[in-house]
Image (cartoon, rainbow, N blue to C red):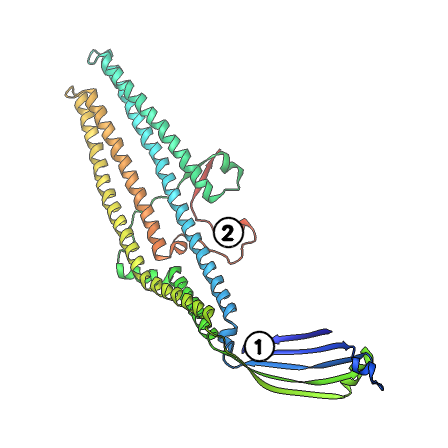
Amino acid sequence: RFDSGIGKKTPWGTDLELGTTWSRLDNTLNREVPPSLFNPEYSSFTGLTVTQPLLRDFGPDVNLTSILIARKEADIASLNWLGQVQATVAGVVKRYVDLAAAYRSLNVRDEAIALAQKLVEDNRSRRDEGKMTDVDVQEAEVAVSIRQEERISADTDYVERLNALRVLINPVDAPMVGGRIVPTTPFQTRRPDMDREALMSLAKENRDDYEVARLELEREESRVAYALNQKKPRVDLQASVGSYGLDGDFSGTYDESFSGQGPEWSVGLQVSIPLGNRQAKQQLAIARKQAEQARLKEARLDLVVALELDTVINRIETAAKRLETARKTSALSRSFLESESQRMKEGKSTSFHVLEKQTDLSASRTRELIASADLQKAIADLWVVTGTVLDQYKVSVSDRVESPDQQGYVPLELKVEK
């Protein structure tokens, strides 16, 4: 026996099959009771068979479910990938901010060393004039050593933050790998608009989470609809038309078939009702539970985004207040240092008090740098929460990246020291 054919299934569930069946039969009746017509007998049937489901597997919504789900999952994967890109961009920005703060901290340490060295020179001059002792000079020299040690630690921190940034930006320039990156992009001093309603609307418009939640819900609802259909009994309308041929050899049976020896056609219904149908019921229960989880996730998304927005706004406001206070403290510390230095020249103060004011100035400038960096990072987090980080930092993402040169990078100004 030999069967062969080609078939096609339409979105409506219709099965179309054009095929042929050939068989060889050794008929004992023909062999033992003459006169025999054919021994052995060769028979064939060639025709078209159409099967149309009427309940289960009927309609494009059911038969295209797997394709629709695959498309939605592809869209979800693309959106999740885009979310990872945004998180990476924000990570680059924040690591750049850390690098910039560490680099500027070196300037603070350099100023502290310069002030202490100036005090050493002044104290030596006063000692030579008999106005100070060796203890005053040594006290200032110890301060220089301490500040130099702090400068070394700050340089180590700068290198660590530099390498952390390199991990993300993956530089391909050899000088960048071996040299030092000098950040030149200034910190943002103006706070963004803190209108919560406007920011919430911006998040709803731009965040990929909302589109992902919608696609996930549609995907699960498609699975529910498919599971509901699979609970139905199978009722199929079947029809076939073709020609039957019988002869004493292989080629002859097809000659007889194509010459119309035995035309055949049939129409009927095939009904199948599974008892219990537990598998379909379980699949429906699972699909409904997953759909309910998707609905809850979509409904909860507004609350999650609102809380994230509240957190980042609070961080921005707190960092801005800290920065404002730190700037005032730095200005006052510098003024106090100048006053104390003048008092020492007049013999009304000591080297110890001047060094104390220098330490206060260095500490206040460091706090100002930290507050400024925290503000920049909080602003970057705000753009992540609102889904606009790529627009804010002018990063474009291509659907197809053929080489590293086509990737979008954060437009930071970097200078390489050789």
- What numbered label is drawn on residue 63? none
Q: Secondary structure at mark 2?
A: loop
Query: Residue 179 vs residue 317: left or right?
Result: right
Percent of width and height locating residue 101: 34, 38
Percent of width and height locating residue 75: 47, 62
Picture layout, residue 138 above or below residue 1: above
Percent of width and height locating residue 390: 41, 54
Q: Nearer the viewer, mark 1 or mark 2?
A: 1
Percent of width and height locating residue 29: 79, 82
Residue visible at 39% across and 34% down in the picture: 158
Query: How much space separates mark 1 and mark 2, taking CA atoms?
Result: 42 Å
Query: Splitting the image into 4 quarters, where does residue 401 fall?
Result: bottom right
- What numbered label is drawn on residue 407? 2
229 or 385: which is nearer to us?
229
Who comes first in sequence, dot 1 or dot 2? 1
Q: Is residue 38 visible?
A: no
Picture layout, residue 248 above or below residue 218: below
Residue visible at 34% across and 55% down in the picture: 385
* Residue at the front extreme of this rendering: 32
Query: Splitting the image into 4 quarters, where does residue 299 fall?
Result: bottom left
Query: Splitting the image into 4 quarters, where does residue 115 fall?
Result: top left
Picture layout, residue 187 above or below residue 220: above
Residue visible at 21% across and 14% down in the picture: 132
Query: Residue 134 vs residue 265: left or right?
Result: left
Q: Is residue 41 visible?
A: yes
Q: Which residue is mark 1?
A: 10
Query: Residue 244 vs residue 208: left or right?
Result: right
Picture layout, residue 101 above or below residue 14: above
67 or 394: which is nearer to us?
67
Residue type, label 2: Gln
The N terminus lies in which quarter of the figure? bottom right
Residue type, label 1: Thr
